[in-house]
Image: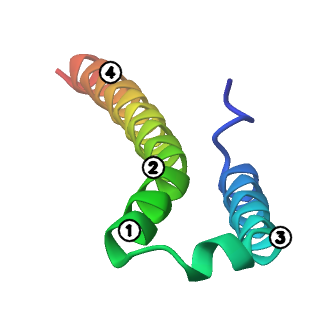
Amino acid sequence: MDKIFSKNIVGGISVLWIVFIFCLLILKRDSLIGLELNSIGDFLAGTFAPLGFFWLVAGFYQQGKGLEQNSEALKLQAKELKKTT
């Protein structure tokens, strides 16, 4: 699980998703030209929502790892304090 949310993997998945959306826009450009602005906004919201959700999950995971490391450091600090007293 640690490898899934590394910076390189998250960046790679993000780039792949954006390239996929770009290819989709190129392939469907004829049908997108006739859309109203509201429909274009709906399309963009639908295409970038999974990427935003993925970033949200990755951020929570990275934050959890940081809290884990801080907890371990506090435990070690408490152990050292007990030794000195």
User: Distance from label 4 to label 1 (Cα)?
Assistant: 50 Å
Q: Position of residue 82 (x, y in %)?
A: 23, 17
Label 3 packing within 10 angstroms: few (<14), some (14-19), many (20+): few
Q: Inspect the image, locate mark 1, and give the three-letter code of the amino acid beneath it.
A: Gly
Q: What is the tally of numbered marks visible in this picture?
A: 4
Return the mark for residue 75: 4
Q: Inspect the image, locate mark 3, and give the three-letter code of the amino acid beneath it.
A: Leu
Residue wearing tag 1: 41
Up the image or down, 58 lies above or below 77; here it is below
Q: Quadrant of residue 69?
A: top left
Up the image or down, 44 lies above or below 58; here it is below
User: Mark 4: which secondary structure?
Assistant: helix
Rendered residue at 40%/25% (across/down): 72
Residue wearing tag 3: 27
Labelled pair 4, 3 in contact (Cβ < 8 Å):
no
Up the image or down, 7 lies above or below 76; here it is below
